[in-house]
Structure formats: structure tokens, C-alpha cells
């Protein structure tokens, strides 16, 4: 049995009442402290990987454009897209693995687990994105509950080793047991974190947005030291939110509705109809143009 399953089992055997927000905040804080070092390592890896991808894109696509070979440029763009999807899937799996196992398993072992699960993260991200786009065509309203139901999607993929609609259905089942608790707790933590970051963001470049600032404003531009704290703090806040969300996931599992582990034919049909409508609208626009 994996450590995630053991931890989940221990949680299930505890109180039958949903944990208080204060308790989850404390558990999230303890987890964030425990995984800080491996998370920092993964952040460094992510930075190096995407910088390297940028230079590869510059070499492939830029070289093809300079050579005036549009076919090679298109091929280069497709290669970059595929590489970006694979790398994003791996880095997402690595981050989730660190949130679950950081401070308990060696980084090398988490790294290997992330590599093994990369394909499932890539496939699921594509399937879920297409599913959500289809729903969003209908004024976004059908998409709103799914934004909540998919909160635990990454943890489900990593822990249960499933992908696609099966992973999405499992996340939905876990969330549905305490939908309003999950939504309320997460929204509260997320809103407070954004208000906190907003205080530092307003000091970035003296509070002016460069795209809309006038010449006079730019001349009088004062860069506050507080503005420089925004990006590192946003990274740390992201770490804490991920830790808190995993603790919320463990708590919600106690009330999961196992019998509801399905996406539902009605939702799939609605998404498919959304894509048909979107295709029709695009064709109409192209015809008009």
C-alpha cells in the first residue's frame, strides 16, 4: 500500500466529522514546510526545462523562418507543442508527487514516479480541456460545477493511477460528498491569498501598469521594494494552496460517493453539442470573411 493510501486510511479512521477550516489550515502549513526543499528543487528544474525549451523553439522555428522554409517552421512548431505538452505533464506530475510524498520519500523516487505517470497527466489534460471547452460554449454555466469537481483531479491521477474521464469521474465522486464544504473552504483560502498578493502586486512599478501609463507617469516611476516581493511570495502562496488542497482532498475522501464514479452521459452529450455549435460558428465566420 502506498504512503498516500496509508495516510488516506488514517484520515478515514479518524473523526467522522469534516475537519474544521482551522485544522486544515494547520495541516496545510505543516505539509508546506515539509515539502519546501523538494518543491524548491522542482521549481529550479521547471525553470531550466522551459528556458531550454525556449532556446530549442528559437533554434527550430527561428532557423526555419530565416531559411524561408515554412514547412519546416510548421513542423518545428508542432514538435515544440508536443514537447511542451510532455514537459508540462511531467512537471505537473512531479509537483503533485512532491505535495503527496515530499519529505517522506527521496526526491529521486518521486522523480521516477512522476516520469511513470507523465503520459496519464498529458492525456487527461487534453481530454479534460476538450470536455471543458465544449461545456463552456453554453455561456460557461455548465462548466462552473466541473471547476469544483475537478479540484482533486491531479491527486486522483497520481494516487489511483487512472486517467481521462475515469480520473475526472473519481475526482467528482470525492468532491460531491462534501461539495459545499470543499467549495467554501477552497474559495475562502484562495480569495484571502489573492488579496494578500494583491497588496504587493499594487507596488510593482509603483502601482502603474506600463501598458496604460502616460509618459509623465513613467518619468516619475518609482519601483517599490515591496513590488519585488510579489513573485517570490506568489510562488510560496502557490505551494501553500497546493498543500492545503491536498489536505482538503484527504478529508473529502472520507465522504466520497463511490456509486457516483461516472462523468454522466448528459454531460458528455452537452460537451459534444458544444463542439458542434463551436464548429458551426467558426465555419460561419470563415464563410463571412
Image (spheres, rainbow, N blue to C red):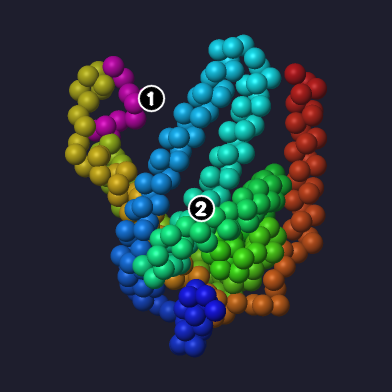
User: What separation in Å lies between label 1 and label 2 (alpha carbons)?
Assistant: 32 Å
Q: Which residue is mark 1?
A: 211
- In the rendered image, residue 3, in percent from the top left (x then y), is placed at 48, 75
Is residue 79 shown to the viewer in this render? yes
Magenta-colored stretch includes residue 270:
no
Left or right of 265 on screen, residue 118: left
Q: Which residue is mark 2?
A: 92
Q: Is residue 22 above or below residue 49?
A: below
Residue at point 50% right, 70% down? 249
Task: Give the image quarter of residue 24.
Answer: bottom left
Of 186 and 82, nearer the camera is 82
Residue at point 43% right, 79% down? 19
The numbered disc on residue 184 is none
Left or right of 271 on screen, residue 54: left
Read off the magenta span: 205-215
Of 78 and 274, nearer the camera is 78
The image quadrant where one finds the C terminus is top right
- In the rendered image, residue 229, in percent from the top left (x then y), is placed at 25, 44
Residue at point 37% right, 56% down? 39
- In the rendered image, residue 256, in percent from the top left (x then y), is placed at 60, 77
Magenta-colored stretch includes residue 210:
yes
- What kind of element bears circle 1? loop
Is residue 138 shown to the viewer in this render? no
Amino acid at each position: 500500500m502506498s504512503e498516500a493510501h496509508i495516510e488516506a486510511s488514517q484520515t478515514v479512521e479518524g473523526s467522522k466529522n469534516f475537519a474544521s477550516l482551522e485544522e486544515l489550515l494547520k495541516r496545510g502549513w505543516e505539509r508546506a514546510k515539509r515539502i519546501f526543499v523538494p518543491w524548491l528543487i522542482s521549481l529550479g528544474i521547471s525553470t531550466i526545462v522551459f528556458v531550454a525549451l525556449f532556446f530549442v523553439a528559437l533554434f527550430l522555428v527561428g532557423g526555419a523562418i530565416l531559411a524561408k522554409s515554412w514547412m519546416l517552421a510548421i513542423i518545428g512548431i508542432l514538435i515544440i507543442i508536443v514537447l511542451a505538452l510532455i514537459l508540462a505533464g511531467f512537471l505537473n506530475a512531479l509537483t503533485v508527487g512532491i505535495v503527496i510524498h515530499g519529505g517522506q520519500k527521496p526526491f529521486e523516487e518521486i522523480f521516477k514516479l512522476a516520469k511513470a505517470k507523465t503520459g496519464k497527466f498529458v492525456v487527461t489534460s487534453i481530454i479534460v480541456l476538450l470536455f471543458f471547452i465544449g461545456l463552456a460554449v453554453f455561456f460557461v454555466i455548465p462548466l462552473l460545477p466541473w471547476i469544483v469537481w475537478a479540484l482533486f483531479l491531479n491527486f486522483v491521477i497520481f494516487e489511483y493511477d487512472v486517467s481521462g474521464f475515469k480520473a475526472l469521474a473519481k475526482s467528482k465522486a470525492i468532491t460531491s460528498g462534501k461539495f459545499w464544504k470543499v467549495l467554501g473552504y477552497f474559495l475562502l483560502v484562495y480569495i484571502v491569498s489573492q488579496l494578500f498578493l494583491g497588496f504587493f502586486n499594487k507596488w510593482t512599478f509603483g502601482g502603474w501598469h506600463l501598458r496604460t501609463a502616460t509618459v509623465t507617469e513613467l518619468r516619475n516611476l518609482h519601483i517599490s521594494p515591496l513590488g519585488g516581493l510579489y513573485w517570490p511570495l506568489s510562488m510560496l502562496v502557490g505551494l501553500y494552496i497546493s498543500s492545503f488542497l491536498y489536505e482538503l482532498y484527504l478529508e473529502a475522501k472520507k465522504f466520497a460517493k463511490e456509486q457516483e464514479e461516472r462523468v454522466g452521459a448528459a454531460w458528455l452529450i452537452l460537451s459534444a453539442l458544444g463542439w458542434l455549435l463551436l464548429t458551426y460558428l467558426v465555419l460561419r465566420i470563415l464563410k463571412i470573411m
